[in-house]
Image: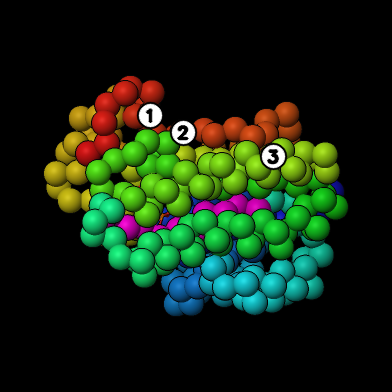
Amino acid sequence: MTQKLALVTGAARGIGLATTRLFLREGWQVAMIDRDVPALEAAAADLQGVETFVCDVSIPDAVDQLFKDVLARFGRIDALVNNAGVADFGPIEETDFARWRRVMETNLDGVFLMTQAAVPALKETKGAIVNIASISGLRASTLRVAYGTSKAGVIHLTKQQAAELGEYGIRANCVCPGPVRTKLAMAVHTPEIIAAYHDAIPLNRYGSEEEIGEVIVFLCSAKASYVTGQVIASDGGFESTGVGLP
Ligand code: NAD
């Protein structure tokens, strides 16, 4: 049987690296994509069945070159996981335009650029797209104007992908993680925020990278063949409780 190929952006660490390992467990090949070259090389060093591709997903020419390289190497794409993201905690009055753009460029422009470039190959395989948004895209908070807005955009873009691409057999779904102790989160989560999350989450804990990755891999698999346009929170119950964001 032909081995399937998943593209995972932001694969050098955190949720992207855990997802890569889970795809490998399920027999997939993975194109690991990241802009952090040393981290990407270190992450791939002990993995069998991966190739690394250095790319900043917010740069159109870099994304074009990436798809030329991936298709030259593998000739197919079965799943695209738009996971690369940057964090930012700031309210409207403290977020200057450069900061706003930095977040939008990776979190929203990157998902658009990667999707547009992947569609021709995904049509061939009737492939799947999974976008990683956040619980911050589901609810407003006093701290996350750029991050939350970018992730709300990813949620809508997922529905748009499902609506437009369903006729080609392409499925698109969105995972909204709750807090996970990655480099991205721990750079901005103060002890107060950590404590507030523990209180507000019904399971009273942070999630793990693997708990998010399992949902992503499921959504890319044939087990989810009738699931598209969905926004799935993997968040310990946070979204369903009505408790405000810290
Ligand atoms: P992380 O910082 O551990 O990993 C993110 C990876 O993305 C890094 O390797 C980084 O180099 C890469 N990256 C960033 N910008 C890039 C770009 N423009 N081009 C290519 N690579 C780029 O973060 P993580 O926590 O694993 O986050 C993964 C995703 O999950 C992000 O989209 C994040 O917003 C989302 N998320 C995380 C949490 C959390 O609590 N950790 C919660 C909700 C959503």
Tag 2–tag 1 contact (CB < 8 Å): yes
Find out if the beta carbon at label 1 lies less than 8 Å from the nearest ligand 1 atom: no
Q: Earlier in the sequence, mark 2 or mark 3?
A: 3
Q: Is residue 84 magenta?
A: yes
Find out if the beta carbon at label 2 lies less than 8 Å from the nearest ligand 1 atom: no
Quadrant of residue 160 in the image? top right
Q: Earlier in the sequence, mark 1 or mark 3?
A: 3
Quadrant of residue 156 in the image? top right
Which residue type does callout 2 highlight? Ala
- Residue 215 visible (yes or no): yes
- Image position, residue 179 (x, y; %): 33, 43
Residue behind mark 2: 233
Q: Which residues are magenta?
A: 80-90
Label 1: which secondary element: helix
Which numbered marker is on residue 29? none
Residue behind mark 3: 162
Residue behind mark 1: 239
Q: Is residue 244 magenta?
A: no
30 lies above or below 144: below
- Image position, residue 197 (x, y; %): 24, 36
| Colour mapping | rainbow
Which residue type does callout 3 highlight? Ala
Q: Is residue 57 left or right of residue 236?
A: right
Residue at image location 42% in from the left, 36% down from the top: 138
Classified by dominant secondary structure, the portion drawn in magenta counts as loop
Label 2: which secondary element: strand
Counting other residues with Cα less than 10 Å from the Cα at mark 2, is it few (<14), some (14-19), or many (20 or more)? many
Nearest-to-viewer mark from 2 and 3? 3
56 lies above or below 80: below
